[in-house]
Image (tube, rainbow, N blue to C red):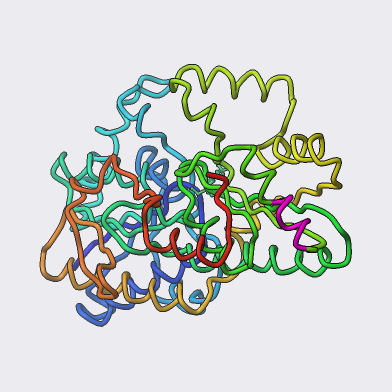
Amino acid sequence: MKRIGMLTSGGDCQALNATMRGIAKGLYTIYGKDNVEIIGFEDGYRGMIYDDYRIMKPSDFSGILTVGGTMLGTSRTPFKYLDQPDENGLDKVASMVHTYRKLKLDALCVLGGNGSLKTANRLSEEGLNVIGLPKTIDNDTWGTDMTFGFHSAMEIATKAIDDIHTTAASHGRVFIVEVMGHKVGWLTLYSGIAGGADIILIPEIPYDMEKVISAIEERNRAGKRFSIIVVAEGAISKEDAALSKKELKKKQEKEKKGMVYPSVAYKLAAKIGERLGAEVRVTVPGHTQRGGAPCPYDRVLSTRLGAEAARLIEKGKFGVLVSVKNYEISNIPLSEVAGKLKYVNPKADIIREAKLVGISFGD
Ligand code: F6P
């Protein structure tokens, strides 16, 4: 009997269920339904730490290809606190290792983003057979060209920009759509291009407020009635980018405390309104970007990644992230992935191409 553990960790996204289905169906085909037992941990690593799990049945994996969220629940278990005992003095890593051994698991599949994959790598170093699967709407996981969730979130963010377009065309206004992504701008970049944004602001390209203003003015001069700015949650100005990490944190905390601006979009709106005397409106699709059914692309990607995880278990290849490399499903050691982020390269072709069609990055 093969005993395989599964968990979903960190912020949720679309296609978590589809990925678990891919793993389970792959395992049932490889070993036969009667020879596999899948153990699902509740709420991510929390379930492993506190021995909270359920034995899954083959029927649990039917009818979930199109269902958003995660049937196992998820939670964040920050890596930086992993080695700090919990409030009752429990050693979290030791507890997870104990649960794995107690359940006599042959492997553990972790569906997670960057922080969760650091923990996955840690468990692998502790001697557990771990396979990671790249989950996040941010598409910022190192070592894979694509993460599941990204395309679904892109569709939602793009739809928000499309909808703003029609109302923007009716009014002579500046519209700002804030897209998720604190550290990286993939989602903003792709949905911004797909939605025909005039200005795209991402964390990797600090913006100059004067350049943003002149891009709007240029559009006004050309007789355009409106401008659409798509900004990532984590976009920062050139001045802020010049601050040390500590100084920036202090400044952001101060702004948050005083509730001066709830987020970067409101800060931009205030500045643009002040400078141009323009009517500015802000739209924040927020967590809707992680909600709902996975798009067809993600269903296919998740099915492939999940099935490949089953194949890697059969081959006994562990300590890896199932990944996408040049449109093929591949894998990469978790040790190479852990602790790194895949940023947008400001010099990438896609940025040059976007600029060629007239999109301003405020730089
Ligand atoms: O990492 C996924 C993500 O949706 C980010 O894009 C976003 O910044 C963050 O999670 C939001 O986290 P939370 O759901 O904890 O508010």
- Pick the residue in front: 360 or 295: 360
Please give the range of residues in magenta: 216-222
* 29 on left or right of 57: left
Question: Dividing the picture into quarters, in which one does residue 263 lie?
Answer: top right
Q: Is residue 319 above or below residue 262?
A: below
**Looking at the image, which residue is at 42% across and 63% down?**
350
Q: Is residue 122 above or below residue 239?
A: below
Question: Dividing the picture into quarters, in which one does residue 220 lie?
Answer: bottom right
Decide if residue 27 is in sight here: no
**Looking at the image, which residue is at 74% across and 50% down?**
217
Q: Quadrant of the N terminus?
A: bottom left
Q: Position of residue 45 (x, y in %)?
A: 38, 43
Q: Position of residue 224 (x, y in %)?
A: 78, 63
Q: Position of residue 309 (x, y in %)?
A: 25, 67
* 127 on left or right of 18: left
Q: Quick one: which residue is furthest to the front in this view? A: 221
Q: Is residue 2 above or below residue 250?
A: below
Q: Main secondary structure of the magenta part?
A: helix
- Pick the residue in front: 20 or 324: 324
- Pick the residue in front: 357 or 236: 357
Q: Is residue 221 magenta?
A: yes
Decide if residue 316 is in sight here: yes
Q: How many marks?
A: 0
**Looking at the image, which residue is at 73% across and 20% down?**
258
Q: Is residue 356 magenta?
A: no
Q: Position of residue 164 (x, y in %)?
A: 76, 63
